[in-house]
Amino acid sequence: MTERSEPLTVAVCGPVGSGKTALVAEVVPRLHAAGLTVGVVTTDVTNSEDATALRDALDGLVPSDLVVGVVGDPAPETLHSDHLRAFLRSNPDLDRVLVESGGDTTSGTAPDVVDYSLFVISAAEGDDIPRKRGPAVVGCDLLVVNKTDLAEHVGANLDTIERDARTVRDGPFVFTNCKTGEGVDAVVDHIEKAALLASST
């Protein structure tokens, strides 16, 4: 078996407000605790607030120069391809690179560069998102249903979300609450299974 020589790249996509940044802030420390070196690339059309928030959240775990915020191009798949390739060339010894998109509605950013895609939705947006069969919900490697603690406050039924996710997807899904850490270990497990698979091919 040939050992993988480049970092596993993981796209973290989803609508604005779904909790992508909070999820990254919970996932990275768990990867770090497993002895892995991690970099983060964030993209937004108008600002780099997510990168700033993650530098603060990950201070002491990830050097600030390994949390990069990219601002500008409204075509995130093009933006990530160019900037992510440059980031990977500059940091070839990293184990994992998380690529947070700026509110994309696609399942993965720069599919020719990213190895594994998470699509994050919020239970606070209602329980009909999986049922609508958006291409990102159906096609991502892992669907993450975040902010489960808010479901009851908006009349969303988690059982309905689970049923519909099973119906529309062939792949896995995970419920998370980043405030408590619930479900985050399962997300990390899926990422590490993808890394193991990538290392064996």
Image (tube, grey):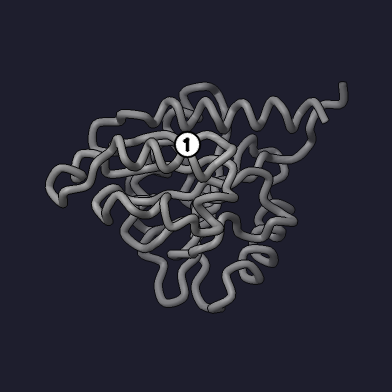
Q: Pick out the residue farthest to the left.
A: 153
Q: Which residue is at the front of the view, 57 or 108?
A: 108
**Location of residue 53 with respect to 39 vertically, above or below:** below
In the rendered image, residue 29, in percent from the top left (x then y), is placed at 42, 32
Total marks placed:
1
Which amino acid does the dot numbered 1 rest on?
Arg
Location of the C terminus by quadrant is top right
Image quarter hosting the N terminus = top right
Q: Residue at x 27, y 53 (%)?
A: 126
Residue 155 point in image, percent of width and height: 16, 48
Residue at the spot x=51%, y=78% of the render?
72
Is residue 43 depicted above or below 53 in this figure? below
- Name the element at disc 1: helix
User: Residue 25 vs residue 39: left or right?
Assistant: left
When asked about the image quadrant of residue 109, the answer is: bottom right
Residue drawn at point x = 20 percent, y = 44 percent = 151
Residue at the spot 75% in from the left edge and 40% down from the top edge: 6
Q: Is residue 66 visible?
A: no
67 sits left or right of 26 in the view:
right
Would residue 7 be visible to someone looking at this image? yes
The percent position of residue 125, horizontal first and vertical second, equals 27, 56
Q: Residues within 10 Å of mark 1 (few under 14, many from 20)?
A: some
- Residue underneath mark 1: 166
Point out residue 144 in the picture as x, y percentages from the top left corner: 43, 42
